[in-house]
Image: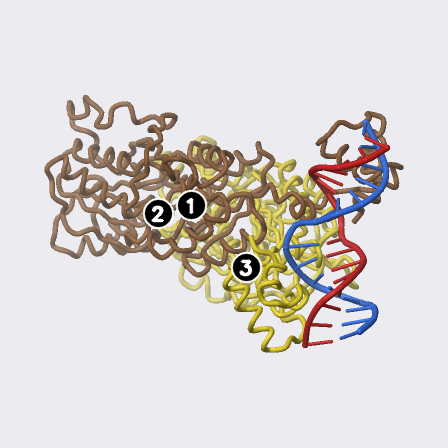
Chain colours: A yellow, B brown, C red, D blue
DNA sequence: TTGAAAGCGCTAACAC
DNA sequence: GTGTTAGCGCTTTCAA
């Protein structure tokens, strides 16, 4: 691999001139610049990003850690973020924490050692991930996305779970359903917790009690399927199931069918995320669309503004963006007159983000 | 951030001793080693992977470039590879080429500039990706996985598409289907091409002609759905659709339902990959399971063995691993007696990989 | 505007 | 077994 010195020799100038000509960091005689460019091309010179990073302390790379890339929600977020980062000439270094807090910590450390300029993380566990996230946030700009840990550790960007779940519950109630049950992952992660809380709050607004304890497992298809079995087996009648995400809801659809229950006639089902498969399930899934693009945009904005907010006045912030309701056939049609006024007026557009608000963590 | 010199000062030894003690590269007096360890801990020392990489030319990082992370096949492969790489203490730097050859080339260059020790790529296009892949393979060990470019450029690891499609076609034929049609992505990528070829070959083995030209679009849900429309609208009767992957097949199920066709009674459907949603669709999808674990294993083996094979005698190799048939309800039950002998005897176990064979490229 | 020289943090000869 | 020295490839003072 040719180095900058090889180019310098070939062009008959000094290494510094090559550096300046190639990076444009300072003015260089146009004629020399041309000679340098030609020499670089003829030698097939490519700059060494490692040497540059060592010297400048900037790697033009940001790291991302997701709980599980096989959960289709995260690929959507990753793609949005990569598109956005591309515009900034920044590379994304993506890691999977494999649902394991120890792995998550290892990944974070590896990213820091590689001198990434910033980190975007969706932490596994509100409690267990906190020490590592906090420690890393002291060393490098860090944004939490979707999920977050407890305590005021860093900026956070995510969907407004309260609004999303609220709209879903309102829709079910407007459709005549009164016996609602919540199925999600264990509330050790903040998404699950926020949505569970939002579910209770939404029911309370309608003066309803849940039709049974929340069923809490994991964010995957199998849990949704198994939870359907549990619901069918329990004596408690249920006419609506609010699921913590689409993957669970899709498993739920299958499980209910296997249990001989029809959707939406006997039991309505809702999801969260709006992954591609939500549109083609049978029946198609009513859900709430995560604002991936807006989330990615916001992450980059906060990251470039440099930092996790701990030093700015007011400390870390949370940005929550309203998700968009997608009504499909897994929920009953709304009774006439019932939906005259939207439950969250003016919040059902993806473009609208709620104003930046202090994050109320935990 | 403390450096090795800070630790050296704290421990009262030289920087080299710290380096040796921490890395274990050479023997160090146990007492000093202990002092170093203590000093490092008290200062919160973390080694600088960038400096190390510059010095040693090894980054303990391998890069991966996938066509589209939102295609659920790739997350499965990524997770398998990360698990495997973790055992080697190697970090995975994952990039998405966003279905764009220009982006793909940029990603490859960025990886090389970052001094990755190797690259795993699933190239977008047999032709258009070839120049970039070839150029990169000259600079760094590179393995192609799943898809590959034309020409003998590097080692390749993938599923045995011929065997997989063959088993699927045999199953349909054994189930009494004779009017089979192929729906996939455009054959500009090698997976699509191999599977299309395998489909024709399998039909020929049975003395059958396809029930219409292959329908070629993109590897996504919407194309499957749209292709179903096309099939329904065309006069040509079809009693079995072999899809290029699961995502298309899942869209196909939906599209056929919308067109009023029943699966499998009127039309049988098969997929390829065995993503999680294949098991819970309605009806559950008959498909072929990609041997992700074995593919990851093989990639790492070839990568560690260092190189893209261009210099070894015999040149680049291709390793194709037999996928595993997963029979579900989207295909008709097999007629009695018809499946007495398996069409590809002894190949229906994931563990068995076909022997390394010369890759027959293009 | 250009070149010489120093140094980012680390490891690997080379001496002792 | 340990310290000294040099240098990975680059950028950035500092002089000229």
Alpha carbon separation for disc pair 1 and 2: 8 Å
Q: Give me the disc on residue B339.
A: none
- From the viewer's perspective, is residue A159 above or below residue B121? below
**Which chain is indicated by disc 2?**
B
Residue A75 visible (yes or no): yes
Q: Which residue is drawn at 22% across and 25% down?
A: B342
- Circles 3 and 1 in contact, beta carbons < 8 Å: no
Give percent across and percent down for residue B55. Answer: 67, 45
User: Both on one chain, marks 2 and 3?
Assistant: no
Q: Give me the disc on residue B72.
A: 1
Q: Label 3, secondary structure: give it.
A: loop
Residue hosting label 2: B247
Residue hosting label 3: A45
- Closest to the camera, between mark 2 and mark 3, is 3
Using residue C15 as the reference point, say whether residue B104 is left or right of it: left
Give percent across and percent down for residue A113. Answer: 69, 46
Question: How many other residues sit within 10 Å of disc 2, few (<14), some (14-19) or many (≥20)?
Answer: many
Alpha carbon separation for disc pair 2 and 3: 42 Å
Q: Label 2, secondary structure: give it.
A: helix
- Circles 1 and 2 in contact, beta carbons < 8 Å: yes
Using residue A310 as the reference point, say whether residue A123 is left or right of it: left
Question: How many other residues sit within 10 Å of disc 3, few (<14), some (14-19) or many (≥20)?
Answer: some
Give percent across and percent down for residue A76. Answer: 49, 54
Residue A131 visible (yes or no): no
**Which chain is indicated by disc 3?**
A
User: Both on one chain, marks 1 and 2?
Assistant: yes
Q: Residue at x 52, y 60 (%)?
A: A43
Q: Label 1, secondary structure: give it.
A: loop
- Closest to the camera, between mark 3 and mark 1, is 3
């Amino acid at each position: 691999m040719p180095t900058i010195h090889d180019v310098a020799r070939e062009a008959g100038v000094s290494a510094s001139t090559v550096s300046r000509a190639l990076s444009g960091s300072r003015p260089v005689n146009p004629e020399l610049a041309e000679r340098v460019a030609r020499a670089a091309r003829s030698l097939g010179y490519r700059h060494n990003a490692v040497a540059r990073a060592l010297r400048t302390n900037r790697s033009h790379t940001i790291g991302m850690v997701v709980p599980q890339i096989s959960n289709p929600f995260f690929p959507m977020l990753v793609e949005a973020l990569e598109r956005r980062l591309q515009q900034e000439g920044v590379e994304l270094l993506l890691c999977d924490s494999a649902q394991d807090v120890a792995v998550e910590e290892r990944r974070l450390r590896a990213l820091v050692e590689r001198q990434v300029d910033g980190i975007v993380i969706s932490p596994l566990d509100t409690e267990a991930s906190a020490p590592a996230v906090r420690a890393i946030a002291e060393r490098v700009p860090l944004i939490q996305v979707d999920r977050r840990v407890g305590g005021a550790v860093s900026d956070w960007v995510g969907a407004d779970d309260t609004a999303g779940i609220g709209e879903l519950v309102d829709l079910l109630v407007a459709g005549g359903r009164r016996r609602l049950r919540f199925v999600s992952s264990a509330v050790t992660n903040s998404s699950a917790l926020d949505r569970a809380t939002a579910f209770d709050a939404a029911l309370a607004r309608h003066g309803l009690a849940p039709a049974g304890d929340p069923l809490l497992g994991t964010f995957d298809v199998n849990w949704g399927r198994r939870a359907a079995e549990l619901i069918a087996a329990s004596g408690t009648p249920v006419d609506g199931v609010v699921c913590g995400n689409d993957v669970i809801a899709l498993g739920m659809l299958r499980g209910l069918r296997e249990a001989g229950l029809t959707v939406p006639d006997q039991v309505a089902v809702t999801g969260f995320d709006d992954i591609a498969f939500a549109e083609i399930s049978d029946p198609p899934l009513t859900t709430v669309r995560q604002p991936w693009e807006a989330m990615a945009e916001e992450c980059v904005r906060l990251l470039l503004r440099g930092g996790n907010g701990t030093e700015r006045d007011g400390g870390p912030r949370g940005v929550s963006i309203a998700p968009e309701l997608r009504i499909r056939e897994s929920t009953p049609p709304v009774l006439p007159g019932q939906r005259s006024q939207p439950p969250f007026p003016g919040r059902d557009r993806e473009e609208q983000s709620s104003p930046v608000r202090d994050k109320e963590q935990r």
